[in-house]
Image (cartoon, grey):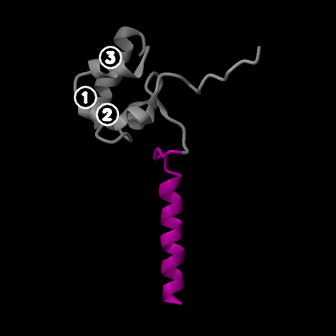
Amino acid sequence: MKRLKSIITFSFVLMLISSAGFTTETSSKVNINKATIQELTQLPGIGESTAKNIVAYREKVGGFKTIDELKNVKGIGEKKFERIKDLITTEDKPKEKQNP
C-alpha cells in the first residue's frame, strides 16, 4: 500500500512539473518579444537580472527582429545564446506555407 501511494505521489509530481510551463521539445517556444520576466527566467541560464535586461532592450529598440539580436543584450554571450536559441522565437507561431 505504501508503495502504491509513493507511485501515485511521484506520478502526480511529474504531472505538475510537466504542466508548470517548462519548455520541452513539444511545447511552444518562448517569444522574446512578448515574454514576461518570469517567463524568460524559465530559460536555462537566464536569471532575473538578465531577463530584466532582455525586457529593457526590447522596449528600447521596439522589439527583436531576429533571435540573433538577443546577443546584443548585456548578459547574453555566445555560450548562453547557444543554450537557448532552440527554445526562443520572435514570432507568435511558425508561418504556414501558402498554396499557390
- Choose between 88 and 41: the one closer to the eye: 88
The answer to which of marks 1 and 3 sits earlier in the sequence is 3
Residue 32 located left or right of residue 1: left
Name the image quarter holding residue 39: top left
The answer to whether the residues at label 2 and label 1 have Cβ atoms under 8 Å apart is yes
What main secondary structure does the magenta stretch of the protein show? helix
Q: Amino acid at mark 2?
A: Glu
In this view, the residue farthest toward the top is 61
Q: Quadrant of the C terminus?
A: top right
- Choose between 26 and 48: the one closer to the eye: 26
- Within 10 angstroms of label 1, few (less than 14), some, or many (20 or more) residues? few
Residue 43, horizontal then vertical, whole percent: 37, 39
Residue pictured at 30% horizontal, 37% vertical: 46
The answer to whether the residues at label 2 and label 3 have Cβ atoms under 8 Å apart is no
The answer to which of marks 2 and 3 sits earlier in the sequence is 3
Q: Amino acid at mark 3?
A: Tyr
Q: CA distance from mark 2 to mark 3?
A: 19 Å
Q: Amino acid at mark 1?
A: Glu
Residue pictured at 24% horizontal, 34% vertical: 79
Given this view, does label 2 or label 3 mark the residue nearer the observer?
A: 2
Per the image, label 3 sits on a secondary structure element best described as helix
> Mark 1 highlights which residue?
78
Q: CA distance from mark 1 to mark 3?
A: 17 Å
> Mark 2 highlights which residue?
82
Instruction: Indicate whether residue 80 is drawn in magenta.
Output: no
Q: Which residues are magenta?
A: 1-25
- Within 10 angstroms of label 3, few (less than 14), some, or many (20 or more) residues? some
Residue 62, horizontal then vertical, whole percent: 42, 10
Residue 4 located left or right of residue 56: right
Residue pictured at 51% horizontal, 58% vertical: 16
> Mark 3 highlights which residue?
57
Residue 18, horizontal then vertical, whole percent: 51, 54
